[in-house]
Structure formats: C-alpha cells, structure tokens
Image (tube, rainbow, N blue to C red):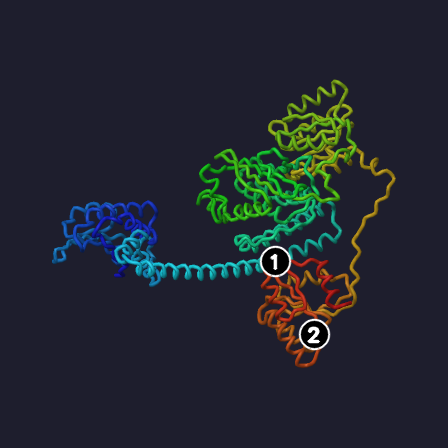
Amino acid sequence: MFELGKISLKDNKYLIEKRNKLLDLIGALGFGEVTATRLTTAASEVIRNVAGTSDESRLELFIDERKGRFGLLIRFFSADDISEDAKILEAVFDETDCSFSGNGINILGSFKFIPDHSFKPTEDFINREREKISRLTRDELYGELKKSYSDLEGEIEAHKRTEEMLEKAKIQAESANKAKSEFLASMSHEIRTPMNAIIGMTELLLDTSLSNEQKGFVQTLGKAGDALLSLINAILDLSKIEAGDVELEETDFDLAELIEGTCDVMAIRAHKRDIEFLSRVEPDVPINIVGDPSRLRQIIVNLIGNAIKFTDGGEVVLNVGLLKKGYPEYRESNDAKSLCLFFYVKDSGIGIPKDKQDKIFESFKQADSSTTRRYGGTGLGLSISKKITTLMGGRMWVESEIGKGSKFCFTAIFKPQEAKSKETFVKPGEIDVKGISTLIVDDNATNRLILREILSVWDAEVTEAEGGGEAISIIKSAYEKNKPYDLVLLDCRMPEIDGMGVAKFLREQKNSESTTVMMLSSDYKTNDLKQIDKYGIGAYLVKPIKRKELKNAILTTLGLWKAQVGKEKFKEVKKAAVSIPHLNILLVEDNPDNRLLIKAFLKKTPIEIEEAENGQIAVDKVKSKEYDIVLMDMQMPVMDGYTATKTIREWERENDRSETPILALTAYAMKEDRDKTLEAGCSDYLTKPLKKEKLLEALLRLTGK
C-alpha cells in the first residue's frame, strides 16, 4: 500500500480546494473525465458530511493492490457514525466498507480499480502526487500566514520567501529559454540538411534543358523551398520576437511578385483540397515599395495556410488594397510619404466563435482543443504574425461567424521606392486591347471582379456572365447582331454547363475563328488539356491568375504579341559564368546527397575534388597533401567539423605551415553557432541550403584566385 497524503477535514472553509485536489489526483490516475467527476462528486458529499465532526476528521488517500491490480483507496475518519455515507460511495466505487478504530473514530473506506490494467505506481509518480496533495492552496497559505505572522517580522519573512521563489522561477525560466534555443537550433539543422539537397538540386535542374511546363514546375518547387526556408528562419527568430528584440529590414521589393510568388506555392495546397484560391491586388496599389518582404511573406503564408487548413471545399481569397486618410482602419506613420496597405485573407471555412476570437492570437492557443486534434498546428503562427504586424506599424484582427467562414485582416506601413513610386499593380495602356470586346464567364464573383478590374484598366470592353447557360445566351445574342466577342475568358469548373461546354458551343458557331477562348481553372487536369485543341482553346491558365501571365496569354492568343514586338530582335540573356581557376578542394561531408550536390555545382569548372566522410579522414588527408581550400561540414560522426578544424590548425602551427582556407558548411543558423565556427579556426562559413553563386563567390574570395 502506497500512502499519497492526508487532508484535514476539521472545518469546511476550504472544501472547494480539497475537492479540486481530489479531482486532480483521480484524473492523474487515468480515469476519464466523466468517471473522475462522478467519483469526486460522491467523495465531496461525504467530505461535506464529515467535515468538522471532530479535530481528527480527515481524508486519507492510498494506492492499494487487490486481486493483482492497483486501485485508488479513500478512507474517511469521523467521530460520527458514517455508515449511511457508504451508500453514496457504493454507487461509484468497486468496494466499500465501514469499521471502528476503537478510540471513538469511525472509518469509511472505498476502493476503485485504476482503469489501466498495466498501471504500476513509480516513485516519481507517488512523490509528485504527494507533493500536490500536501501543497497548501493560496487561500490555505494565506490563512496559515495570517495565523502565524502578526507582526512585521512575519511579513518580512514572507517577503523573503517570495523573493526566493521568484529567483528560483527566474532561474527555471532562463534554463527553459536556453533549452528552447538549443532545441530550435537542433531542429533547424535537421531540417536544413535535407533541404540543402532539395533546393540545390532544384537550382541545378533549372540549368538543364526543360520544357516550359517542366520549367514552371521546377520554379514552383524552388519557390516552395525558399518559402519553407523563410519559415524555418522565422521559427529561429521566435525567442527574439517574444523578447521584442527584432529589427525589420528596409529593402526594395516588388509587392506584385511577392504576392504572386507566394500564391503560386500556396495554390498547390489549396488545389489538393479542391478549394478555389484567388488573389486580388487592387489596381491602384503601388507595387514598388520598401519594407521587410520576408516578414510580410511570413504573415501571408500563415494566414493563407490557416484558411486552407480550416476550409473544406469553398474558396480562399487574398486581397491587397491601399488605405487612404479617412478609412476607419487607416494607420498613419511619422513619414508623410508612407503607404498604409490593407491585407485580408477570407475563407468559407468553419468560422470562429465570438468569445474565442481574441484567444486565437495568444501563443499556443486555438479556438478549442478539438481544433488541434483535427487540424493540427501549434497555435503559434497567429501570435507571431500579429506581433510582426505591430512592428510594421499596423494591427491584425479577425471577423468571423461560425459556419460562414473567417476574414483575417491586417494593416502595415511601407515606404514607396522613390524612383518607381507611381507604378501600380495594373498600368493603363500596358497592352493595347482598347475596344476589344471581352466576355468573362465565372460563377465566382470575386474572380470576375479581379479579371474585370485588370481588363477595364487596359480599356477592354467587358461583359460578365455568372454561368455557362447565361454565357451561351449572351454569345448567341452577339452572333445574331453580327458582333461576336473578340475574347472569352471561361472558368473551367461551373455548375450545370461548365467551361468546356461553353467552349464546345463556341466551336460549333460559324466564323468562330474570330473569337479567342482562354480557359481558367483551379488546377491542371489531364482531361482538360486533351480538349484544348479539340475546342480551339487558345490558353489554359491556373488560378490564382497572375497579371503578367494574363497579359502574355492575351497578347499571344489574340496575335498581338508579334505586332507589339515588331521587327525588334530579342536575344536570350544568360548570366555570365563566373571564371573559376583550377583548384584542389577537399570536400568533408558525411551526407552523400550534399556531396553529390556540391560536385554537381562545380561540375563544369576546372576544380578537382577529393572527398572525406568525416573529420578524422579530413585531418589525415590534410596532413598528407596540400589543398587550396577545405569545405568542412560541421556536424559529422566520428569527428565533427569543429574538432577537425581545431586539430588541423594545431598541426599547421606545430609544423610551421601556412593556414589552409577552411570554409564551414553549417545547417545551424543561429549567431552563436556561426561564432563557434570562427572560434574553431574556420576562415568563413556558408549556411545551408547552399546556393551555387554564393559557393563560387566564397571559393574565389578565400583562395584569392
């Protein structure tokens, strides 16, 4: 029998606290919520009856073994007859009995088998539960202090204890923070190592001969890798964000490219869940701005990712607009030239209850626990995003209703690029389609709005249809008036009559060659692609539609590209290859994928590469042969890169040798880790995933050739 603790019942002042202790213990033993509540309620009733019957009234708790299984044993001690109370406990406990101690105290015992048949009470478990039971509650502690300390000396002593507790809590917090930083650094390394091969091989693949379709796939893969790398960096910055020690970049960037590139990656996830994913940058939004693009991308990726995760079917829309003075959400900056941009991500998902909408912005919190079980996630992304938004001079909030979706909004302050401050997302006269009659057919109102805005700024004559049936009626009317449409933009997926049905109808009309048809779809479908030539479809674009893709498709399909280019000759411009001299390199890397990647990077150069799979082999090779440079991975078995570098430097000093340049290759990205490589004796370092251009630059810089 293992004693867990004793609880005094000589008065009923702290009955609620005592009940809570009992409920906590029963829950810790593995009983379900309903069973734990029933057991606690029955025991609480007896406690209420027994409390105060004598100075010896108490509750004792044990873990006992009966019939080869462990269970919870509760004993009540009272000066009064408590045999009637046994009936309360018999209904929920497995065994109940009454006895008399002989000194005027009655004993009521109840036993309940622990639901886990394999349960074995460990010493740690017993000590932990004893400590919780014996610990005074806040009210009990206050009562004891009030009784024990009536003068200044008592208050001072209590203050000292509080200071000691705070100091202990501080030490624990600092220890936890250090452990968290070490975990994040370790996690970063584990993720960056395979990512090095993924991003590097993608870069190499782009240098090979690919079809336009294949090139698009590989470019999307590369963007996805870069986006994932940005997220890893954001996770590593978590501790800095929480400490308020984050500085935003001030970098020139193209907002349109950032939005469209991010949406390219997120569209893949949306299409897998059969979600209509649309992005809209309002025509008057300046696109050449100054700010922190990686932090902005981080917020947008998080909001779109959440919207996709919590939406089954339906749609997700990203909208970017320019706020001016007078708008309710306008945020003014100290700089008169600054821009206040308004972003929102709207979905048709599950929605969020009103009373939980503030809670979701707290760290590690979601609307309810079932959300985590069903959809996953840490509940950390929104908290970080909101803090970054605040750093950007804006704010973040949510508008939502259960069953009707959510709309996450945020504002942020940016500066315009002086030289390109007037360039907006859609430029009037960007292409010459003035007067071209255009029919937009889409059952999604947002997508019609996006296309109408762009085409209207380009001065096209735009008509809209909400579905295939209405489109056919409009097209018939146009043919009857001998005014067929020049351009028809068709959504592929529509109820009743889809885009292919409308395209088929157009194909069957006389003189249909005068109408150019473009198909817009949420994803690539093999069957769709097979029907493109059959129905005379000029282009097939995947949503979210990008402005440049739409422009080029219109120019090409309408035959305007050649006319616009005229007789100008365009030559493909390729980056001049960096002139690399002959070098002897020792590549020290335990991961075969990373060795293959680096060798592929340097394949077309006059560089000779020898390999070493760990630091010990590297040390032996350096002692036996001279190298122009050593590429040293820092995390390896047998002997890591830090030890190998220190060993090489010691050998060079002992033998009066000049230092061989050692370039550290590390998957750790924390400042402390970078400092550690330099302290070990490395000449410089590169952070994985490696980029070919950065590697070549480092080789030239360190070898002086």
Q: Quadrant of residue 289?
A: top right
Q: Nearer the viewer, residue 224 or 14?
A: 14
**Would residue 355 be seen by someone viewing this image from the given angle?**
yes
The residue under label 1 is which amino acid type? Pro
Outermost residue on the front side: it is: 152
Outermost residue on the right side: it is: 567
The mark that comes first in sequence, 1 or 2, is 1
The residue under label 2 is which amino acid type? Glu
Q: Position of residue 677 (x, y in %)?
A: 62, 67
288 versus 517 height, above or below: below
Q: Quadrant of the N terminus?
A: bottom left
Q: Which mark is residue 194?
A: 1
Assess disc 1: are there few (<14), some (14-19) or many (≥20) residues with their C-alpha within 10 Å of its C-alpha.
Answer: some
> Marks 1 and 2: which is nearer the front?
2
Outermost residue on the bottom side: it is: 655
The reply to whether discs 1 and 2 touch (Cβ–Cβ < 8 Å) is no
525 versus 147 height, above or below: above
646 versus 211 height, above or below: below
Q: Position of residue 592 (x, y in %)?
A: 64, 63
Q: Is residue 294 left or right of residue 554?
A: left
Q: Position of residue 123 (x, y in %)?
A: 33, 63
Under circle 1, the secondary element is helix
Q: Is residue 231 left or right of residue 29?
A: right
Q: Is residue 124 left or right of residue 342?
A: left
Residue that badge 2 annotates = 659
Alpha carbon of mark 1 to alpha carbon of mark 2: how far?
Answer: 31 Å
